[in-house]
Image (tube, grey):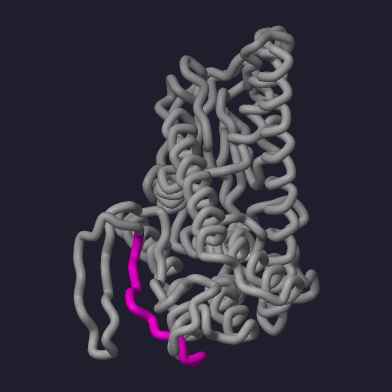
């Protein structure tokens, strides 16, 4: 089942790219601009088909996004049907259409999830308290310490913890916060751990660490728990009439967290440059850690979908929704080579200076921006693989 969900997740992610570019495509044609090519991913080209409307549909090799090639994309082009000849308002619509598509998709998916079951991902996640019910709560294992009682008992990552029992006593594990208190009650004892593995309820014997051993490890580089697992909660929250409100509120929350992450990434880059310039190795390494922890690329997205596929289709959908919102946010920022960069440059050139960019300057800006973007993607991919 998880393999099927992973494939669905990858297809939905590709669908976000198609939807984003389709927004540009439709907006261009509605504003009289000729679309010459609709491409999924970036060249070199793998497949090409001429469509009835006179434009080419292509599938390309590099999974770094997609594109719509318009007639006369230079801001100074004047030929009929060219992008350059379109009005400033038309250009704004065309360049912002992809952002609008991703924003709408994100809000629609989050609204559906709020109705059928929204995974709780962050503390104080936005909800309307009077219209929110918990429909599912599971305590899952995210990490098993090698050599720990849990490892010896055969517990695996993503197993669901159900309870712990000993002769004459049994305790149900209701949330991740209660696990340390539960295991402390049985410190040093042989217990039976009840858990679910791939949907099958199982039991295993384990001898928990004593309090003395556990306490002694807390001041070392390898602190231990009585059972030796790191738990997390998988909670689904459902709403009814407030589902659209929850979608908007959660989107705003995700937007805030995205900008917070971008701020940390920029600060990390600053530490890298400062540490390199001053020879401060510790500052440079700290900057690398801070910057890399806030970003992910194609490999990271695949691994995120792979991990989410084991938790169910709601988790896959919320990942896709968040990616869609993130695409909308990143593509409205003034980042060269992305829609936002092109939009803001055009608004400045046409709206403030009242004249189009020269072909040479525009090509130079786009080439530098694209080179920086590809370099970042390569670096992020290497970081993802190492991570």
Q: In this view, does 48 lie to the left or right of 331?
A: left
Looking at the picture, does residue 63 appear above or below residue 288? below
Residue 39 part of the magenta segment: yes
Residue 310 coordinates in the image, percent (x, y): 42, 50
Residue 53 coordinates in the image, percent (x, y): 28, 89
Q: Residue at x 49, y 33 (%)?
A: 383
Residue 227 coordinates in the image, percent (x, y): 57, 24
Observer able to see residue 350: yes
Frontmost residue, 232 versus 278: 278
Magenta part of the protein: which range?
30-41
Frontmost residue, 267 versus 82: 82
Q: In which quarter of the image is the N terminus?
A: bottom left
Looking at the picture, does residue 212 appear above or below residue 245? above
Residue 382 coordinates in the image, percent (x, y): 44, 33
Q: In this view, does 228 lie to the left or right of 350?
A: left
Where on the picture, by quarter, is residue 154?
A: top left
Q: Is residue 230 left or right of residue 197?
A: right
Q: Residue at x 34, y 74 (%)?
A: 38
Q: Which residue is drawn at 58% across and 45% down?
A: 139
Observer able to see residue 236: no
Looking at the picture, does residue 321 appear above or below residue 377? below
Looking at the picture, does residue 349 appear above or below residue 29? above
Residue 333 part of the magenta segment: no
Frontmost residue, 362 versus 110: 362
Tally of marks: 0
């Amino acid at each position: 089942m998880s393999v099927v969900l992973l494939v669905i997740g990858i297809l939905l992610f590709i669908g976000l790219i198609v939807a984003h570019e389709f927004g540009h495509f439709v907006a261009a044609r509605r504003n009289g601009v000729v679309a010459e090519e609709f491409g999924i991913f970036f060249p070199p080209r793998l497949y090409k088909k001429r469509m009835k409307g006179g434009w080419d549909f292509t599938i390309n090799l590099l999974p770094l996004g997609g594109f719509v090639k318009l007639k006369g994309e230079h801001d100074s082009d004047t030929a009929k049907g060219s992008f350059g000849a379109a009005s400033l308002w038309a250009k704004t619509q065309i360049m912002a259409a992809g952002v609008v598509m991703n924003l709408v998709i994100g809000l629609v998916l989050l609204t559906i999830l709020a109705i059928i079951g929204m995974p709780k991902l962050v503390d104080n996640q936005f909800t309307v308290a009077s219209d929110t019910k918990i429909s599912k709560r599971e305590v899952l294992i995210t990490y098993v310490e090698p050599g720990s009682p849990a490892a010896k008992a055969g517990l695996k990552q993503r197993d669901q913890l159900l309870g712990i029992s000993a002769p004459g006593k049994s305790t149900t594990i209701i949330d991740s916060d209660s696990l340390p208190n539960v295991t402390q009650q049985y410190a040093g004892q042989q217990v039976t751990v009840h858990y679910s593995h791939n949907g099958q309820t199982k039991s295993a014997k384990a001898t928990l660490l004593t309090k003395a051993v556990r306490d002694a490890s807390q001041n070392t580089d390898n602190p231990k728990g009585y059972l030796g697992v790191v738990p997390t909660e998988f909670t689904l929250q459902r709403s009814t009439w407030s589902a659209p409100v929850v979608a908007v509120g959660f989107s705003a929350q995700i937007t805030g967290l995205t900008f917070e992450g971008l701020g940390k990434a920029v600060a990390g880059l600053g530490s890298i440059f400062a540490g390199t310039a001053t020879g401060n190795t510790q500052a440079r390494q700290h900057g690398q850690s801070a910057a890399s922890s806030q970003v992910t690329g194609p490999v990271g997205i695949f691994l995120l979908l792979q991990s989410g596929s084991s938790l169910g289709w709601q988790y896959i959908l919320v990942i896709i929704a968040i990616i869609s919102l993130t695409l909308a946010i990143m593509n409205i920022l003034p980042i060269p080579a992305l829609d936002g960069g092109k939009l803001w440059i055009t608004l400045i050139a046409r709206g403030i200076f009242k004249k189009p960019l020269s072909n040479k300057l525009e090509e130079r800006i786009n080439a530098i921006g694209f080179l920086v973007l590809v370099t970042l993607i390569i670096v992020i991919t290497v970081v993802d693989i190492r991570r």
